[in-house]
Image (cartoon, rainbow, N blue to C red):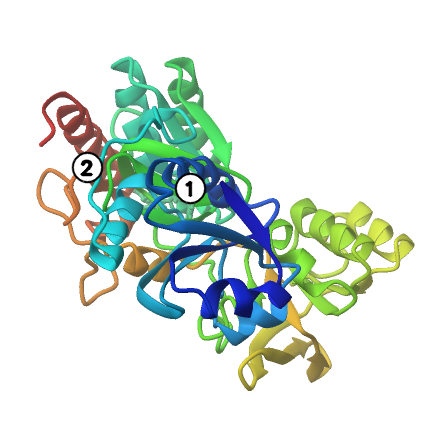
Amino acid sequence: MITNITTEQFNTLITASSENIILDFYSSECPPCEALAPILEDMAATYGEHLTVYKINRQENRELALQLDVRSSPTLLFYKAGVEVGTRLSGVITKSQLLDSLLTVFGIKEVGTSLKSELPETIDVLILGAGPAGLAAAIYTARAGKKTVVLKGKATSRLEMAHLVENYPGLPPITGKDLLQVMEKQAIGFGAQIIKGDVLELALGSDPKMVTTRGDFFSTKTLIMAMGKGQNQQSIENEERFVGMGVSYCATCDGAFYRGKNVVVYGNDHEALDDALMLKQLGCNTTLISYCKSNQCPSELIEQAKIKGVHYIPNAKILSVQGASMVSQIEIQLPEGKQTLDTDVVFIIQEVPSQAVLQKAGVSITSKDCIAVDREMKTNLPGVFAAGDVTCGGLQIAIATGEGVSAALSALRYIRKGV
Ligand SMILES: Cc1cc2nc3c(=O)[nH]c(=O)nc-3n(C[C@H](O)[C@H](O)[C@H](O)COP(=O)(O)OP(=O)(O)OC[C@H]3O[C@@H](n4cnc5c(N)ncnc54)[C@H](O)[C@@H]3O)c2cc1C
């Protein structure tokens, strides 16, 4: 049985206890937390005589979470006789990772659990990126009958920016946009599913691999990374330093921590507006900052924001986030000059910087910030491949599609043979 506890119960039930304890800091509206729940229930049922599992809502026990330096949900902490031991697990947590921790932290051996599968259904090939590399890969894997999902991030494919392409073999001059549409149609025609979403977290050491976006959670046998070069990314000073400490990429996941506080949403599109309105409903003093000029932003965005009481600042760029341990201020660039704004959090609703996500997942990166691959587009991790501009292979459409095809063939081989 798993018991939900509060901050007040933390000392009596955890630090004053002589038992082996797993403490799960979770949040509502958190796909990896939902995926972890049945695994923890199974662990509690199977190993109940060796350990106790407690859950604590991170949003409702924010001070304790901060005190324990818990920055993301879910985070599992392990306690032995009242003292935290071992290495914390956070983000996408698989059953095998948890079993490994039980062995190393508590010395508990696996006895075989009743858990049939971990949510959700495992797909064959997950492709990150809907540019020529990702779509070429999808055409091959979907045509081979494999369940293929392509994630299309917020960043614009570089191909979409190409005014006229004259050097793609076999085609007369064509706009980048049209060429991309043809590729997309072809992939969908073979059964590939294209879903909007930026990758927030990757767990690639396990089988299946787990991928989290703002709204979804995927389990996949193989992964092809084709996220391009991300030249659109605007760098915000200190952004990475404050992730989890006042910088967030997911208002749905973390918004409830900031009820009644000053919040900033940074983005240009309807997702940013929806997030701003949701935060306003939570009672936050909400500011929406967009970097499009006011006459270029969707007009409904401005109107709705104003009607609902969201403070709206167009044509502004966030230059830096500042604070001691938590964000307390941001510096913004306006046409008339720089300005500072007090805030407790910034929700960045634009593309998520891939480098940090990749590094955390253990993907080898070259000194030129490209994903390291061999001739078969294999990365350093089994079942994980990369293609296109992310590998810095030549920065051309034909090279991106060629690498996408190679990565697809390697992924199909991996599914067939495990190598
Ligand atoms: C102006 C311009 C003109 C060009 N003209 C030519 C030309 O004439 N001929 C030529 O051969 N090449 C040309 N190129 C280069 C060519 O467009 C690129 O080499 C090609 O688009 C690379 O393909 P890709 O699939 O690797 O990446 P991209 O096309 O950049 O696609 C990347 C995809 O990944 C997605 N993504 C990014 N981050 C994430 C994330 N975290 N999660 C999920 N998805 C994510 C993006 O949304 C996008 O769908 C041009 C480039 C530019 C900018």
- Give the number of the disc on residue 383: 2
Q: Is 71 placed above or below 304 here? A: below
Q: Is residue 163 visible?
A: no
Q: Would residue 331 appear left or right of 304 to someone viewing this image? A: left
Q: Position of residue 225 (x, y in %)?
A: 30, 43
Q: Within the displayed image, which quadrant is ligand 1 positioned in?
A: top left
Residue at the bottom extreme of this rendering: 324
The amino acid marked with disc number 2 is: Gly
Residue at the right extreme of this rendering: 307
| Sooner in the amino-acid sequence: mark 1 or mark 2 | 1
Residue labelled 2 has its Cβ within 8 Å of some atom of ligand 1: no
* Element on which disc 1 rests: helix
Viewer-proximal residue among 172 and 244: 244
Residue at left 31%, top 59%? 360
The amino acid marked with disc number 1 is: Leu
Label 1 packing within 10 angstroms: few (<14), some (14-19), many (20+): many
Viewer-proximal residue among 318 and 413: 413
Q: Position of residue 233 (x, y in %)?
A: 47, 61
Residue at left 37%, top 46%? 93
Quick one: quadrant of the C terminus?
top left
Residue that numbered label 1 is attached to: 40
How many tags in the picture? 2
Q: Is 248 placed above or below 4 here? A: below
